[in-house]
Image (cartoon, coloured by chain):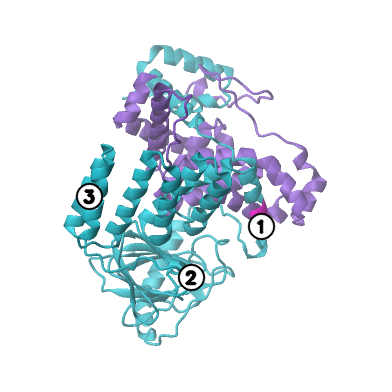
Amino acid sequence: MSDATNEPPEPTEEPMAVVGQSRVVKPLRTTDVDDPALLDRCRALDPEALERVFRECSPAIERLLRRMVGPSHDIDDLLQSTFVSAMGTFKNFRGEASVRTWMCRIAVRTAIDQMRKPDHKRRHLALLEEPTDETTDRDRAREIFGRQCLARMYEHMEALSAEKRAAFVLHVFEGHPLEEVAALTGSSRAATKSRVFWARRMLLSRARRDPLLREFLEAM
Amino acid sequence: VKNLGCLRFQEALDGRASPLSNASRLALEEHLASCESCRADAAAIDQLRALADELPTELSAGRRTRAIRAALATDVRAVRPARAPRPWALAASLAAAAIVLAGIGVSWIVASDPAMTIKDDARKAAPPSETEPSPENPSPENPSAIDPPSHLLAEAGAVQVFDAATVELLVRGFLRVEIDPSRHQSFRVDAPRFSVLVLGTIFEIDELQVRVLRGVVQVLAPDGRVLVERLEAGQSWRADLEPSETEAPTETEAPDTSPDDARRLLARAREQIAARDFGVAGRSIDEALAAPHGTREAAEAATLRAEMSKLRGDTAAALRAYRDVARRYARLPAGESALFAAARIARQRGDRAEARALFDEYLSRYPHGRYRTEVMRNREALDP
């Protein structure tokens, strides 16, 4: 095996730019919401403390949920379910990970549970806004094409199992290292690696057979 | 087709968005420079990731606050935490299914007593029904029988009564029911305010409404009177939208005669409207309404008139017409679409209060409606 597969990732303190891209990975960080006194109040279900923690963690959770369930599903209910689950288990939170990481883990499980439901594939219609005067036909066509491609990509992702989809989104789209994805999904590293591999293979295969996505891939 | 050399780089290829070691990064770059197949994969992944980056990820402050407040208002004592995926869950489910199947024979005998009930007061907070007993989901401790040809998925909160002759369910809470049409005789679902007669279909039902996802059902009043002869896939019906004697008269949900003439004339009217030939279209609509027609055709005709007003630029008349369709045909898809259209017109007219009220009315009437996402976005934009 080469270095590419054997060598563990070097610990990084600063966000790192990655090969061939301008993408920057934001590590999950420890913040003042990890203050032990605040967490003790959360364990006692103090509404003010809970609201402070939820507000701090909410953007990261919303991003995770949106990426996992796609554009055709509302994440409001999932966000609420995540908070409710967190309230129900806060007393068991030992503070070994940051509270944000812990809540992201709950969000991932909430999203996986949602994706397993048989009616998850029922989508709400998303209509396009009325064109404004400033919008040119070309911009409009490009926007519509982009939204169609995005929706189509998530349709193909719905063919994946909830676990494969979660692992793929968290690792390939969100940039979480495999170890972190394994922790977030409650799986082993080997299982996570395998899921990402097969998910990527299946998604690319389907995308290349889909006329719309093939056009998107070839146009870029 | 990948060769073995490529397979060594798959992990690094997948993990390009995550921090890679310098060695891994260099090795991958070297490989990509020489392997066209992996280079194409890497480019495709980058493009799909860029596509995913287009997703709006954060909620607005208002929606976030609503989610937080709603969670804080929840009684967490009734909530079970989200569970980690359990690898043995499938085996446990199979074992539980075997036990249920074995118990069906006994249940069919016991089921001659129609008073058998399953009670569960937890609603929404608990996840879909589990196979093991729990304080939040006590169904397994109760006598129950799932008719073999039926496939029943019940969320916590359902009360079910099984009868010997037919499967009869008394609903409190929310149920999704799937019936195999090839094997099952008809059966009835009794909700507190109405009943549904089904024969091979998939539908969702709660105390107030029924939504048909596949097939056809009939809605009955508690006294056995037919309220809706045929409720088809994609349609929903709400008990609280049934007209009372004090309300303004609405169209009756008469048996749909589906007259071809009226439909043909309405289709022609739609083409004429598209061609902006409004005078002729109006006459076609009049002719359609003069011919034998059902509720759906009447709703279509009223919608076409509203569309004509909108296309003529008379948004005040269009708004009135759409509101009228929404009120009179609230149970039909046309009513739902009309309410959404009315709200959009109010927004375009700059009448923010009216638009807010109409979007709110939509969310209240159709919490799982077809335009829910769009309505929520529009409603959000109207927040002060």
Q: Is residue A187 visible?
A: no
Which residue matches tag 1? Answer: A88
Mark toward the viewer: 1 or 2 = 2
Residue B70 forms part of the magenta stretch: yes
Alpha carbon separation for disc pair 1 and 2: 23 Å
> Looking at the picture, does residue B42 appear above or below residue B369?
above
Q: Residues within 10 Å of mark 2 (few under 14, many from 20)?
A: many
Which residue matches tag 2? Answer: B158
The residue depicted at 24 percent of the width and 41 percent of the height is B272
Residue B77 forms part of the magenta stretch: no
For the residues bearing labels 2 and 3, Cβ distance under 8 angstroms = no
Secondary structure mainly formed by the magenta segment: helix
> Looking at the picture, does residue B191 appear above or below residue B44?
below
Judging depth in this view, the residue of B358 and B305 nearest the camera is B305
The residue depicted at 25 percent of the width and 65 percent of the height is B256
Quadrant into which the C terminus of chain B falls: top right
Q: Position of residue A158 (x, y in %)?
A: 40, 43
Q: Residue at the far left: name it.
A: B261
Q: Are marks 1 and 3 on the same chain?
A: no
The numbered mark at residue B284 is: 3
In the figure, the shade used to draw chain A is: purple
Alpha carbon separation for disc pair 1 and 3: 61 Å
- Amino acid type shown at disc 3: Ser
- Label 1: state its secondary structure: helix
Q: Is residue A201 left or right of residue B273?
A: right
Q: Is residue A49 visible?
A: yes
Q: Position of residue B315 (x, y in %)?
A: 44, 43
Alpha carbon separation for disc pair 2 and 3: 49 Å
From the rendered image, report the letter of the chain displayed in cyan: B
User: What segment carries the magenta color?
Assistant: B69-73
- Amino acid type shown at disc 1: Gly
